[in-house]
Image: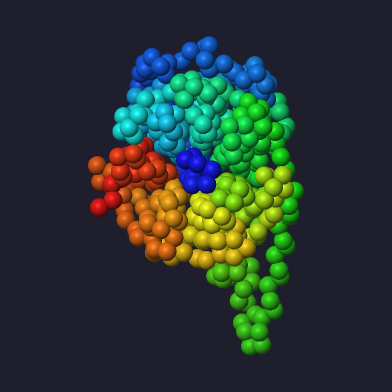
Amino acid sequence: MPSTTLRSTQFFGALLFALALPISAQAPEAEAEAPAAYAADETTVDTPPTPEPETAATAATDPALLDAEMMPRASRSLLLDAVHTNGGYFAVGERGHLLASDDGVTWRQAAVPTRSTLTTIASVDGVLWAAGHDGVIVHSTDGGQTWIRRRAAPWSYDIVDPSEGVPVMDLLFTDASNGFAIGAYSLMLVTADGGVTWTPRTISSLGPAEAAEPPPAPEDGADPAAGTADDWTFSDDDLALDAESDPHLNAIARAGSGALVIAGERGTFLRSRNGGETWTSKRLPYEGSMFGVLSWQDDHILVYGLRGNVYESRDLGDSWTRVETGITTSLMGGYALANGGAVLVGANGAILSRPDANSPFTATAFETASGETPLLSGVLPMDGGGFLVIGDKGADLYRPQ
């Protein structure tokens, strides 16, 4: 993430694609020797000093606990999040792929102690953290040269734990020591030691879903058979989804005021003004899922997600304005530019951009060199101009006309 106030997030929509992939799926590529700086080294990819929920059997076979395989075409595989640091560009994705690049064009794969899909990556002061499926969190303190697995919670028959196998969807560090990891089924983990240890935290303000109201009685003269269980015609009210008691938490950001916000499944929106100690639940106007949050100065935030829906708030979610996008494809990644500007990306190669908060979004469709319109999951500005975009076809460059 570029900073605590101008940041991009990954998005649960791209993960819907990732979740459909068998973790142990065979890759078409042949194995290749890693560059010397990124070769596997047992002395640099140790297991963490804190215990992990694993047994000897799962440790020997579970992909979450095995080193990522080095693949020559990893930069063309599914990538879900990226970050830019003084050490270069880093991107994460399926099968534990973690890639590094000096220029955003040529990529090398890092040796990472997991084969679980990595969904998110964050950086503060040159320290890097990445996380994903099976509750995996990995950590680098040397600019991405070597990685240590700090947490893993793969599902197994031996452990009965509601957090087993739950994917981490986003990471946020407020400084080099204090951070949050959020994910599916209202997962929240906190760290105060730079990501070495992680403690579960319950967001107690999330209540149970409200009971659906019974359907109204038919009006006089109406067909009594209409609206019965045999009627396959549904109204918008029939199709409305109730709020979940443990919704997936998809994205977390820190506003310029220092407040924290979370966007998630089925209109879920949470905020905290005390550093994440307590959270207030505030429903979004749109009852669909939001996959990302951008933030600027003060309490200015923007959420984006399902079916091209974008909402903006200047008061940290007390009130919202719907932002016209002109598209109905889901938006899955974004980056906050100066003065309220933003770039959003999503399905079918969709790219939306605006130079500042007072300008409308303009839409374009990104195509690869082979003419494909990929599912885009993340975007970062490049040092030399243009943008790095990532998605189901890997990493690529986008230069606006």
Q: What residue is rendered at 25% in x and 52% in y?
A: 401
Give the residue at the far bottom of this rendering: 221
Residue 247 in picture, x, y percent from top left = 64, 50
Q: List x then y, in percent, for residue 389.
A: 36, 42
Would residue 74 be visible to someone looking at this image? no
Residue in the foreground of this view, choosing between 135 and 258: 258
Q: Give the image quarter of residue 396.
A: top left
Q: Residue at x 63, y 88 (%)?
A: 221
Q: How is the image coloured?
A: rainbow
Q: Position of residue 382 (x, y in %)?
A: 34, 40
Relative to 210, residue 147 above or below: above
Q: Camera-side residue: 117 or 174?
A: 174
For image coordinates 48% across by 13% down, the residue present is: 41
Count of marks placed on residues = 0
**In screen coordinates, is 323 left or right of 195?**
left
Residue 218: image quadrant is bottom right
Q: Is residue 293 above or below residue 152?
A: below
- Identify the residue shown where x is 40% and y is 16%: 37
Task: Using the rendered image of the protein, determine whether residue 102 is visible from the camera's viewpoint.
Answer: yes
Residue 349 drawn at (x, y percent): 35, 50
Closer to us: 94 or 359: 359
Q: Does residue 59 lie above or below 351 as drawn?
A: above
